[in-house]
Image: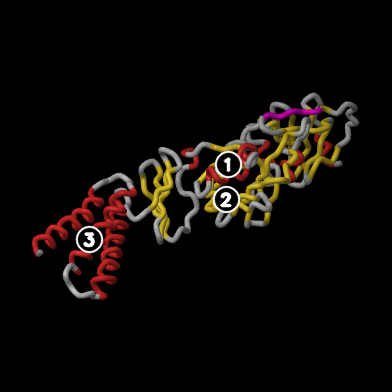
Amino acid sequence: MRKKKIILIIISLLLIVVPFLINIYSIYKLISLALGILLLDISFTFNKKINIFLLIYLPLLLIIFTYAIDYMKTYTFDLSPIYVFENKINDKVSTYNSLFYRIYKCNDKYIFDNQYQKNYVCETDLLESIDINKLLNEPKESYKKYKNDFIKVSGKISKISGTSSILLQAYTKVDGSVNGYVKFNETSKLKVDLAGVDISKYKIYDYITVVGLLSDFDKKTQEMILTNVKIEETNLYNEYTYQIIESSNCSKKLEEYTDNFYTYCIENIYLDYKVDKYELSYVLKDKKINLNDLIKNSKLEETGNYKLYKLEKFDILSCNKNKNILINKNSKVDYSLCEE
């Protein structure tokens, strides 16, 4: 009988120790560990009267001890965890969910998220982007496919709710529209929770790419919820070309354009971002760009207190901080315009 007990203890110890020596994730490691703890408990209670300590507290202590060992060896040595359930998103990104923490695996590097407090921490380019139109085409099927996965979604902002959330909706482009305008589909939407995320530079109709956890779906409102969000930084609105619309009948008078800006022999100026076309007045008013952005690569000519910035498509006569004149290249610069 004693020999059987020793064999049972040896088997149980092997079942407990071996999972810690295998550096790949497998649910069988957790099963082996659980079975080893159970057999070890049985070996100590074998042929004995029921003992509450051995029956309940010993397995509990073993679980706590091995749980702590598993946490520390993964945290310290980047070894594969045991007390977790893997959610494999692709070959480069996985999440491991445990009772008190989550682990992000980013290109074989483990990043701990104690108490599930962090937003997505891996590089956003490790995920393939999903167009919002595709995601919301069949929202029920999309939710079933991506439920509890981290996904990357690209689309246009249809609503901004303070600093708490934004909405992305399916949309169709409108021919000839400017300033990012599209027609949104109201039947389904993606709500993006913004806990700890700054979107102050974004406006309605702007393109945006977000990465987050698809955590919920309201069947009644057809609204999916994205949490633990990270915004992907892009240069989409950093590069543009100008399109100048000259005045058909130049009156040689200043025309008010937008705050602190006037035009001279120019009807309008457009910024072509390739994905969208914006009026310069719109982006100046929205503070997407400012005077310093406009004159960044210009040639400066100074006359008295006035500065003339020569750009490729038009010139800017800066009279003072409250008066800047956008001038047609084909017109002679008249510094007396600053006095009007």
Q: Earlier in the sequence, mark 1 or mark 3?
A: 3
Which mark identifies residue 39?
3
Task: Report which quarter residue 42 is drawn in.
Answer: bottom left
Q: Quadrant of the N terminus?
A: bottom left
User: At label 3, which amino acid type do we have?
Assistant: Leu
Q: Position of residue 220 (x, y in %)?
A: 68, 53
Q: Residue at x 31, y 49 (%)?
A: 28
Of the two numbered discs 1 and 3 in the rendering, the one whose residue sits closer to the viewer: 3
Q: Secondary structure at mark 3?
A: helix
Q: Is residue 331 above or below residue 26?
A: above
Asked if marks 1 and 2 touch (Cβ < 8 Å), the reply is yes
Q: Magenta segment range?
A: 241-245
- Left or right: where 140 falls relative to 126: right
The crowd level at tag 3 (other Cα within 10 Å; few <14, some 14-19, many 20+) is many
Q: Earlier in the sequence, mark 1 or mark 2?
A: 1
Q: CA distance from mark 1 to mark 2?
A: 10 Å
